[in-house]
Amino acid sequence: MTAHLKDISSFLAMEVLARAQELEANGRDIIHLEVGEPDFQAPSEALETVINSLSKKPARYTHTQGILPLREEIAKKYKEDYGVNINPGQILVSSGSSLALYIAIRILAPAGSEIIVTDPCYACYENMIRLSGAEPIRIPLKLEEGFELDMGKVRASITKRTKAILINSPMNPTGTVFSKNTLRELAELEIPVISDEIYADLNYVSRPHSFMEFSDNCAALNGFSKFYSMTGWRLGYLIVPEAWIGTAAKLHQNLMISANEFVQEAGLKVLQESRETCEAMKDEFDRRRKFLLGKLKEFDLDPQYQPNSAFYVFLRYRDQKRSSLELAMEILEKTGVALTPGVDFGPGGEGFLRFSYANSQENLERALKRIKESGLI
């Protein structure tokens, strides 16, 4: 009955998490460095807004593109932070950015077409593309090149069936940012770009960028999970040219009608009032980043590149004959440290482990000490 979905792979980070939770239930002390989830509470303004909203009125359907004040505030953010002029009518608010990604793929790539992706890339990209009936075409990113996108390889991969290029900058799993020159060259290809910008505000060495600064032939994805520490609130959005928004809205109507009203109201309040809180969380992530990189080098585990964004370090381990999933599971069982196997992010991620520093500095230190003492990497 399910043979038509046989090519859809598991989300290995969640499998590691599931096993880690089993061990915790049996009394093991587990240090979670496997999931990209901030360990902070959401801003207090979000909590207060939800309580007030639910206590004063019933939660109802909203406009399928989202409540207008939230879309206006998102447009204001893109103007102030990225210098991009958009209008609220170009924005579709959804319950998380994953559905927004699926909608972007569906409106750009008919069945049988191709979408260029990086390798490694976020685990769900290739599955989303396949679920849409399109084919992912991988462009390898090399550690030796700082995981920068090779535009020569991109150009060589373009065919008549290429309908979009999907990028994530700042990037999961590497924590790197594509150069402005790379973004300009992508724009010059005149192929629609799906730009996942969920980590855009977590850039520690330069100002954040949106691909929309370079081209309006773009579907930009963003949301509240990472910078705003609201993963479980499930609030994301999609920005597209006006010519695409009608189709995107029709898909959204059929898939889920609208995002939760009270969560949208919380997102609005956070955009208006929580910048200082979120910047403080960002500063703490940066301190953890520097600490983790220093400790890895101290333990002779230098990642050999500079991750300057998101909250990840992608480490190539020594014994390249071992599978990353097998190694991650052994580390979990023997040390109680949960890491994500690199193969979760595509064939190009094999031979790597992803460390998430969305955990306290104390736990990072404990985790690295356990790993070092184990001698497993």
Image (spheres, helix red, strand yellow):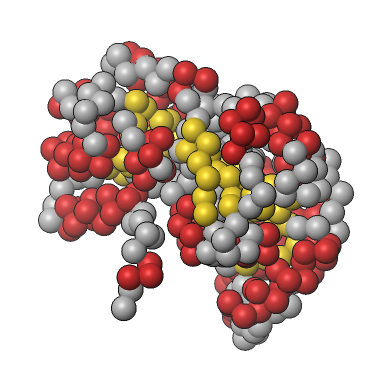
Q: Nearer the viewer, residue 252 or 301?
A: 252
Residue 38 shows up from this direction: no
Viewer-nearest residue: 222 or 29: 222
User: Residue at 54% across / 64% down in the picture?
Assistant: 132
Residue 127, position in %: x, y?
A: 45, 57
Q: Quadrant of the C terminus?
A: top left
Q: Is residue 34 above or below residue 298?
A: below
Observer-nearest of 288 and 79: 79
Image point (12%, 56%), residue name: 26
Q: Is residue 289 above or below residue 40?
A: above
Q: Is residue 109 above or below residue 209?
A: below
Splitting the image into 4 quarters, where does residue 2 fall?
bottom left
- The reply to whether residue 22 is visible in this rendering is yes
Left or right of 121 on screen, residue 352: left
Q: Position of residue 258 (x, y in %)?
A: 64, 76
Residue placed furthest toward the front: 160
Q: Is residue 36 left or right of residue 149?
A: left
**Could you tell me residue 215's position as x and y percent?**
80, 43
Quarter of the figure with the N terminus: bottom left
**Percent of width and height locating residue 178:** 63, 30
Total number of numbered discs in the rendering = 0
> Going 58% across and 52% down the picture, which residue do you hit?
114
Look at 60% across and 43% down and name the residue there: 167
Asked whether, in this view, residue 52 is left or right of residue 372, the answer is right
* 324, 273: nearer the viewer: 324
